[in-house]
Image (cartoon, rainbow, N blue to C red):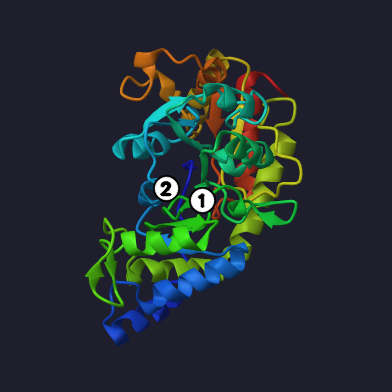
C-alpha cells in the first residue's frame, strides 16, 4: 500500500535529546527555551522577522484576524482546505468567495478585486499546494482598497519568490506545522507579521492578554501557546529540513516528467521555488478523475481529491448566497493529489505513474 501522505519522523535519538532538555528544566509550556530556540532558528532559516510559534495552523489564522480586528467580510478562495474559511467564520468574519485562476488554481486577483465591497476588511489568499499567489497584484489591491492582506501559507514553508521568502508579503502570513506538512512539530503553526507592533500585540494575545513583565491583563486574549514537547519535534525535524525538501522536490519533478501529456499541473508563479508540499494533477473531466482514483486504489495506491468540494458549495460557508465559482468547482471535480512524502521512493513514484498511464490509456 502506498498512502497519499506519511509524516516524517526524525531519528528517535535526535528527538529524545531535545526532550531531555525539557525534562532537565521541567519547563513544559509558557514560551519555554525550546520554543524560543525554534522561533529564532525558523526566522533565520526562512528569512523572516516577527515569527510567533503557536499551537496549530488554524489558531495562527484566528490570531492574525484578531490582531487586525477584522469585521464584515474577507474575500478568499473556495479552493482550499476548510480551515481557511472556518477560521474566518469562527471569528465572526464572513468568507466572501471569489473564483480561482484556471492556470495557477490560486485566488484570481481580478475576481478578488471585483468581490470587494464596503464591508470587506481583508483579503485572505492561499498559496495552494505551495504555489505562491500573484503576491504583487494582491499587494497593490490591498493598498488601493485599504484592506489587510493575510496569506494562508500553510503549504508554502521554505518557498521563495525571486529569492525572497513568500512569507514576507502581505500584512501577515500563517503557517501550519501539522504532521502532514513538509515541516512539522506534530501539531503547531506560526504567524509572521510584517510590522513589529502587530507582532507585539499578538504576543500579548497568545497568553490570555497578560503582559508577563507586569502580570497585568492589557488586552483581550486566548491561549495559543506552543508546548516544549512540540517544539522539540520541530527542532528535530528542522535539523533535517534540507534533506526533506530536496527529496520531495526531486519526487515532484519526477512525477511531472513521467506524467507529461497524461495530466496537467498548476502553472507555477514565475520566479518561485518549489518545496514539494503536494503533487496535484488535473484531468480533463470528473469521469477520468474518478476512474484514476478508483484504479489507483485497486492497485494499492491512495490518492485524494484535494480540495473537494469547492467551499462555496458548502451550505454553511457559501451555497446560501449562490456565489458562482465555476473554475473552483471544476477543479474540485478534476484534481487529485498523488502520494508525496519523504519516505516515498523514486521506484514507487514510477509505479504510481505507470498505473495512471494504464488507467487513462497512455503508454
Q: Which numbered disc covers residue 68?
A: 2
What x and y, as percent, mark residue 350?
Answer: 66, 41
Tags 2 and 1 in contact by the CB under 8 Å rule?
A: yes
Relative depth, front residue between 21 and 269: 269
What x and y, as percent, mark residue 106?
Answer: 59, 32
What x and y, as percent, mark residue 28?
Answer: 28, 74
Give the residue displayed 45% in from the left and 16% down from the top. Answer: 323
Q: Establish if 202 lies above or below 41.
A: above
Give the residue displayed 24% in from the left and 74% down from the top. Answer: 215
Report the label total. 2
| Label 2 – label 1 distance at C-alpha | 10 Å
Q: Which numbered disc covers residue 172?
A: 1
Earlier along the polypeptide chain: callout 2 or callout 1?
A: 2
What x and y, as percent, mark residue 102?
Answer: 64, 23
Q: Establish if 282 lies above or below 193.
A: above
SS of the residue under disc 1: strand
- Quarter placement of the C terminus: top right
- Mark 2 surroundings within 10 Å by alpha-carbon count, few (fewer than 14), some (14 through 19), many (20 or more): some
Amino acid at each position: 500500500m502506498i498512502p497519499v501522505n506519511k509524516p516524517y519522523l526524525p531519528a528517535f535519538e535526535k528527538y529524545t535529546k531535545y526532550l531531555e532538555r525539557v525534562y532537565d528544566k521541567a519547563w513544559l509550556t509558557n514560551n519555554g527555551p525550546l520554543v524560543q530556540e525554534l522561533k529564532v532558528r525558523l526566522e533565520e532559516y526562512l528569512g523572516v522577522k516577527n515569527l510567533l510559534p503557536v499551537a496549530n495552523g488554524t489558531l495562527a489564522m484566528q490570531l492574525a484576524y484578531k490582531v487586525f480586528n477584522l469585521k464584515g467580510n474577507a474575500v478568499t478562495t473556495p479552493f482550499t482546505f476548510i480551515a481557511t474559511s472556518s477560521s474566518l467564520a469562527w471569528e465572526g468574519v464572513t468568507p466572501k468567495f471569489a473564483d480561482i485562476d484556471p492556470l495557477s488554481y490560486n485566488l484570481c486577483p481580478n475576481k478578488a478585486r471585483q468581490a470587494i465591497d464596503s464591508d470587506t476588511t481583508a483579503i485572505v489568499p492561499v498559496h495552494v499546494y505551495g504555489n505562491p499567489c500573484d503576491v504583487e497584484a494582491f499587494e497593490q489591491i490591498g493598498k488601493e482598497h485599504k484592506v489587510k492582506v493575510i496569506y494562508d501559507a500553510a503549504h508554502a514553508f521554505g518557498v521563495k519568490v525571486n529569492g525572497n521568502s513568500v512569507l514576507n508579503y502581505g500584512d501577515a502570513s500563517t503557517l501550519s506545522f501539522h504532521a502532514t506538512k513538509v515541516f512539522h512539530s506534530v501539531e503547531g503553526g506560526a504567524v509572521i507579521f510584517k510590522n513589529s507592533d502587530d507582532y507585539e500585540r499578538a504576543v500579548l494575545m497568545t497568553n490570555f492578554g497578560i503582559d508577563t513583565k507586569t502580570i497585568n491583563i492589557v488586552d483581550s486574549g486566548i491561549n495559543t501557546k506552543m508546548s516544549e514537547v512540540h517544539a522539540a519535534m520541530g527542532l528535530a525535524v528542522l535539523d533535517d529540513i534540507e534533506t526533506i525538501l530536496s527529496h520531495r522536490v526531486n519526487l515532484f519533478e519526477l512525477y511531472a516528467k513521467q506524467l507529461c501529456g497524461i495530466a496537467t499541473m498548476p502553472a507555477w508563479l514565475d520566479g518561485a521555488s518549489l518545496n514539494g508540499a503536494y503533487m496535484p494533477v488535473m484531468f480533463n473531466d470528473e469521469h477520468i478523475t474518478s476512474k484514476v482514483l478508483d484504479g489507483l486504489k485497486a492497485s494499492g495506491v491512495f490518492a485524494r481529491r484535494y480540495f473537494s468540494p469547492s467551499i462555496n458549495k458548502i451550505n454553511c460557508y457559501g451555497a446560501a448566497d449562490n456565489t458562482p465559482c465555476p473554475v473552483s468547482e471544476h477543479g474540485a471535480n478534476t484534481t487529485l493529489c498523488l502520494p508525496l512524502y519523504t519516505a516515498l521512493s523514486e521506484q514507487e513514484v514510477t509505479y504510481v505513474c505507470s498505473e495512471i498511464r494504464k488507467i487513462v490509456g497512455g503508454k
